[in-house]
Amino acid sequence: MIRILFFALALLLSACSKPPIVEQESFVFGTLVQVKVWGEDEQHASAAIGKVLREFDRLHKVLHAWQPSELTNLNAALAKGEALKVSAELAGMLRDAAKQAAQADDLFNPAIGKLIALWGFHSDEYKPALPDTKLVDALVKAQPRMSDLSFEGDTVGSKNRDVQIDLGGYAKGYALDRAAEILHKEGVKNALVNIGGNIIALGEHGNRPWKIGVQHPRKPSAILTLELYDGEAIGTSGDYQRYFEVGGKRYCHLIDPRSGQPVQGIQSVTVIAPRGAGAGVLSDVASKPIFIAGSKDWRAAAAKMGIEAAMLIDANGEVYLTNRFAKRGEFLEKNLKVHALD
């Protein structure tokens, strides 16, 4: 009896000695959001996570591209050729997004909201229907760009009435950076924040880095795992996240602003953004121009965005990695055609 009690007590003490992971989930930005905190008192961790999730809800309402929001108010003004004073936060985001767009040679282009809507992606459900080619061609000819925006303090205008802002390729990264700021402020040292595959790591998971999986673009499982270190962020763009099919052809929400057409020939792109201010934004933004650049030019696009660790999976399922990424990933599937590049 004494031995049994001693064994039970040992198990209890062992369990108590391991700091728990406190985890909460939500659905924001049209995707599943997970926040994990390791090594903190449950009450403290839950309170900190709650602040993060409330911030996500706030940003969702500010930045929604088709439901009433501060962003839709701005877009309505731009369509009329009018300028509008916005919050300092939104103005700052737009200035930063414009810089990112210039760096990406406008392959990252949040000004093509009209094109995204025309293809049916300003909706919670995607109908299998192709848009009028004349309307697509007209918007391509209009060349809406972030450089069309003008700023006077927090007042934003545009010389191009076809500019409609969609920050879908920026907002999740911004939210990751805000989550990191909140958690640091709350004294949380070790956490993992996942917004639909856009992930940022704080600290460690015990005495090891956080280990994450990267979604397989054609299977409901991870294609590889890797360790994410303190302050790093990872982002994936894929043709499997938001798409519809017509005539057996897949049309995804990632649209090439040069053609006005959804990108073909690429299944997914994953990037690792190094630790530093704005790592979340960079992880979200950088995957877009790399995806749009395609199989021939993706490495040049990655270099322009300052990304050294990147992975591209083409239409045939072949995997291309930079050496920096290859050193980090551990594939879970055999018989993949993997090309590690200098």
Image: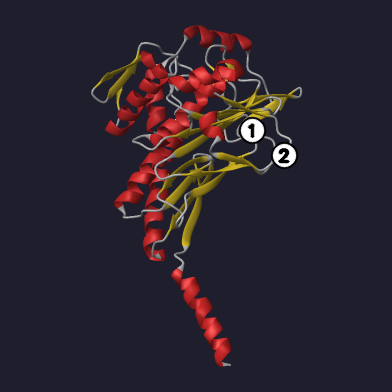
Q: Residue at x 52, y 11 (%)?
A: 139
Q: Mark number for residue 91?
A: none
For the C terminus, the image quarter is: top right
User: Where residue 74 sits: x, y (%)?
Assistant: 37, 25
> Given the image, on which type of amino acid does mark 2 rest?
Lys
Label 1 sits on residue? 240
Residue 248 visible in the shown view: yes
Quadrant location of residue 146?
top left
Q: Nearer the viewer, residue 48 or 159?
A: 48
Residue 81 visible in the shown view: no
C-alpha separation, residue under disc 2 versus residue under disc 1: 21 Å
Q: Is residue 163 above or below residue 42?
A: above
Left or right: 210 in relation to 59: right
> Given the image, on which type of amino acid does mark 1 rest?
Tyr
User: Where residue 117 sits: x, y (%)?
Assistant: 54, 23
Callout 2 secondary element? loop
Which numbered disc flags the more N-terminal residue, 2 or 1?
1
Q: Nearer the viewer, residue 3 or 80?
A: 3
Spot the residue most to the top: 141
User: Where residue 100 sits: x, y (%)?
Assistant: 39, 23
Q: Is residue 58 above or below residue 113?
A: below
Left or right: 230 in relation to 187: right
For the N terminus, the image quarter is: bottom right
Q: Is residue 72 above or below residue 37?
A: above
Q: Residues within 10 Å of mark 1 (few under 14, many from 20)?
A: some
Spot the residue most to the bottom: 1
Q: Residue at x 60, y 41 (%)?
A: 330
Callout 1 secondary element? loop
Q: Nearer the viewer, residue 301 or 175?
A: 301
Label 2 sits on residue? 334
Q: Residue at x 32, y 50 (%)?
A: 184
